[in-house]
């Protein structure tokens, strides 16, 4: 496919220039084009994707696919000795591997496809912060309904149950109580639960997890029983069901994924569909690395400057070693919108003279707009793992090669039926849990994954897919308290990745260390799954050296990781000097310049971030189009 699409090439003027085609920029570009604005979507990567990005079960392999991989290496601590205690530390790169994707669709082409909307409280918090009720949860849910095409919970769906006819009557009286969407661009489905039925080891572990949840007296277990009686079991297991999001119960949940007919469904698909349907309104340029925003006067954005070429950014796994090509430029009539992500959006702002004065002066960049919050407030979730070595290989995985170029029974089935194990992301089940009983909502998501996974390091994906005997229970901590992460320039060269430091735990702003203890509580909960021990199964991570709370805190502090970076250009009120954006996504102190991506959140929302960025893009569509009379 040519690098430049659309009838006007790269020389024409456009209504909007959108930088970055990922979860924020891709849907926004499509939506504005469908409203008959002329949009130029610029992407640093290419258009094609590898086969590993097409098959859902190969998502881990896709994150290390050299053709699309941007390999960031981040710091968890400023203190180098503290950082080196992590077994995932990469000495050659002086950091921890943090995979990102370049290419059309951004990280949505290599993600695990998990699609979970944030709870109502998170949107209400933004509404309160900026004193704008159009951000409230009820209004934001409209955007989720608009973008979703739900295949696992259709209108009027009723599961069988003892009193299913009662629920059937109620469902007819209150249509679509779950507030799902059924005509949007993002297809969502549930994994095939029948996949695990033939594997006694998997069944045993999942039953043990449910038993531990019952013993913990989770309120969600009573909802589950009610669902069996009333025939509403699907609703009780659905973490995106509107009533569950409002009630915030603990308990089991099936994890929705962005998969349609056994294939990954990503932003890339929506972009290409929109280009075919609206070629006169959407122009796509790939392999263009934007280096700065251009301004008509001191503060009015009017275009961008970019470098033309493949693999120019030095985070790329196969970064070009050639000298930088001559800069080019393109202009917008209305606005420039940055959607380059939590690392690259603040980098672009600072390269354009917008950011902390001391940071810009350090690199001899003229200050255009002093905004101290740019690149600050970087946040992430924390994750930790409990890994069991089972006495036998999982029968579900026997004979599978997890290689798109080598045939095996599951791959043959995927090619012929687009079904089976390879049509799923491998997430078997999840449990939403409070780490403390006094919390208003669950802050832990605990889910099972066959294979060995303790976080990201070079070659980690092979460890997952080649292993047939380990089961990993991942513990994800939501609503983290740390706000001290930073994105800083390494130098003034736009091809050089920024310095990223999340400042975990002891270096962060969570003085009480609640996040650290929450993960400890998650590990202790997983260890209650008593059926893992009989038959010779052993815990290899954290392992027998970590027993007491103090020992587990030491383990978590060293080994935790994250992969939902956000909040580095936060929305905030006028009175907050660290707020980079207003409630309409406008960069403060400028005109014609907005940010619509994960960096815009003031606080990281929900459990998984992708669906919330999609909702952000839908809201931005309305805000921006209304500002220009449509």
Image: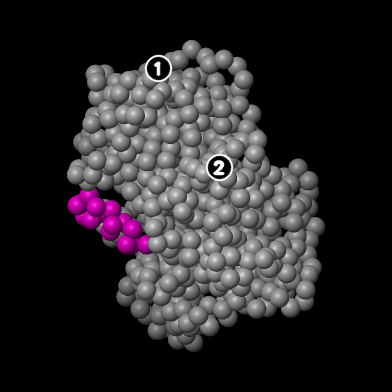
Q: Main secondary structure of the magenta part?
A: helix
Query: Number of labelled discs?
Result: 2
Please say whether residue 128 is one of the residues in the magenta stretch.
yes
Q: As drawn, is 461 to the left or to the right of 228?
A: right
Q: Give the percent coordinates (x, y) of residue 555.
A: 59, 60
User: What label sits on residue 80 in the rendered view?
Assistant: 2
Q: Residues within 10 Å of mark 2 (few under 14, many from 20)?
A: few
Rendering quarter of residue 342:
top left
Q: Is residue 305 left or right of residue 210?
A: left
Regarding mark 1 in the picture, which secondary structure is present there? strand
Quadrant of image for the C terminus: top left
Circle 2 SS class: helix
Q: Are marks 1 and 2 in contact (CB under 8 Å)?
A: no
Looking at the picture, does residue 186 appear above or below residue 163? above
Front residue (pair 396, 78)? 78
**Relative to residue 620, is residue 180 drawn left or right?**
right
Report the residue marked by disc 1.
Answer: 329
**Residue at the spot x=24%, y=19% of the render?**
297
Residue 241 falls within the magenta-colored stretch: no
Q: Residue furthest top?
A: 326
User: What segment is highlighted magenta in the picture?
Assistant: 117-133
Is disc 1 surrounded by few (<14), some (14 to 19) or many (20+) residues within 10 Å? some
Q: Residue 312 at x, y = what percent?
A: 55, 24
Q: Is residue 305 left or right of residue 72?
A: left
- Colour scheme employed for the rendering of this structure: one colour
Q: Residue at horizontal 24%, vertical 40%?
A: 577
Residue at 29% across / 44% down in the picture? Answer: 571
Q: CA distance from mark 1 to mark 2?
A: 40 Å
Q: In terms of sequence position, does the residue under pointer 1 or pointer 2 come before the other?
A: 2
């Amino acid at each position: 496919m040519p690098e430049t699409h659309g009838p006007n090439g790269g020389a024409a003027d456009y209504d909007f220039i959108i930088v970055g085609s990922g979860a924020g920029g891709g849907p926004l570009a499509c939506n504005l084009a469908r409203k008959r604005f002329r949009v130029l979507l610029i992407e640093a990567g290419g258009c094609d994707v590898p086969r590993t990005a097409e098959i859902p079960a190969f998502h881990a392999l896709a994150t290390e696919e050299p053709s699309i991989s941007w390999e960031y290496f981040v710091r968890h601590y400023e203190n180098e000795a503290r950082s080196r205690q992590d077994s995932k530390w990469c000495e050659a790169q002086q950091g921890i591997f943090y995979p990102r994707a370049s290419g059309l669709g951004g990280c949505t082409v290599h993600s695990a496809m998990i699609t979970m909307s944030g709870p109502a409280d998170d949107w209400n918090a933004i509404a309160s912060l900026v004193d704008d009720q159009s951000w409230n949860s009820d209004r934001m849910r409209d955007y989720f309904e608009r973008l979703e095409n739900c295949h696992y919970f259709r209108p009027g769906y009723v599961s069988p149950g003892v009193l299913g006819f009662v629920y059937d009557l109620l469902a007819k009286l209150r249509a679509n109580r779950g507030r799902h969407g059924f005509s949007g661009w993002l297809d969502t489905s549930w994994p095939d639960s029948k996949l695990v039925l033939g594997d006694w080891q998997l069944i045993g572990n999942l039953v043990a997890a449910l038993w531990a949840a019952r013993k913990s007296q989770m309120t969600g277990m009573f909802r589950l029983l009610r669902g069996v009686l009333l025939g509403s079991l699907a609703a009780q297991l659905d973490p995106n069901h509107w009533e569950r999001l409002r009630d915030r119960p603990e308990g089991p949940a099936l994890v929705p994924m962005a998969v349609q007919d056994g294939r990954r469904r990503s932003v890339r698909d929506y972009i290409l569909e929109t280009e075919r349907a609206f070629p006169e309104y959407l122009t796509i340029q790939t392999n263009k690395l934007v280096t700065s925003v251009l301004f008509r006067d001191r503060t009015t954005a009017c275009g961008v400057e970019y470098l033309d070429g493949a693999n120019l950014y030095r985070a790329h796994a196969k970064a070009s070693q050639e000298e930088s090509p001559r800069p080019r430029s393109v202009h917008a009539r209305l606005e420039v919108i940055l959607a380059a992500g939590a690392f690259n959006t603040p980098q672009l702002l600072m390269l354009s003279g917008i950011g902390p004065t001391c940071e810009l002066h350090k690199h001899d960049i003229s200050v255009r707009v002093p905004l101290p919050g740019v690149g600050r407030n970087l946040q992430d979730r924390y994750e930790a793992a409990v890994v069991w070595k089972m006495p036998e290989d999982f029968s579900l995985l026997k004979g599978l090669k997890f290689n798109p170029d080598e045939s095996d029974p599951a791959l043959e089935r995927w090619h012929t039926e687009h079904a089976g194990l390879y049509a799923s992301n491998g997430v078997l089940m999840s449990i939403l849990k409070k780490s403390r009983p006094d919390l208003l909502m669950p802050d832990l998501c605990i889910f099972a994954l066959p294979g060995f996974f303790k976080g990201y390091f070079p070659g980690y994906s092979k460890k997952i897919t080649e292993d047939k005997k380990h089961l990993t229970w991942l513990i994800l901590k939501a609503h983290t308290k740390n706000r001290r992460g930073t994105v800083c320039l390494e130098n003034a060269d736009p091809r050089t990745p920024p310095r990223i430091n999340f400042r975990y735990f002891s270096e962060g702003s969570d003085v009480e260390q609640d996040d650290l203890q929450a993960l400890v509580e998650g590990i202790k909960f997983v260890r209650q799954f008593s059926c893992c021990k009989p038959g010779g199964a052993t815990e290899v991570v954290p392992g027998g050296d970590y027993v007491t709370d103090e020992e587990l805190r030491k383990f978590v502090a060293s080994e935790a990781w994250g992969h939902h970076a956000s909040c580095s250009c936060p929305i905030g009120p006028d009175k907050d000097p660290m707020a980079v954006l207003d409630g309409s996504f406008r960069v403060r102190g400028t005109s014609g310049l907005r940010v619509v991506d994960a960096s815009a959140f003031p606080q990281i929302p929900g459990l998984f971030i992708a669906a919330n960025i999609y909702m952000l893009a839908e809201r931005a569509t309305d805000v921006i189009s209304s500002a220009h009379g449509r």
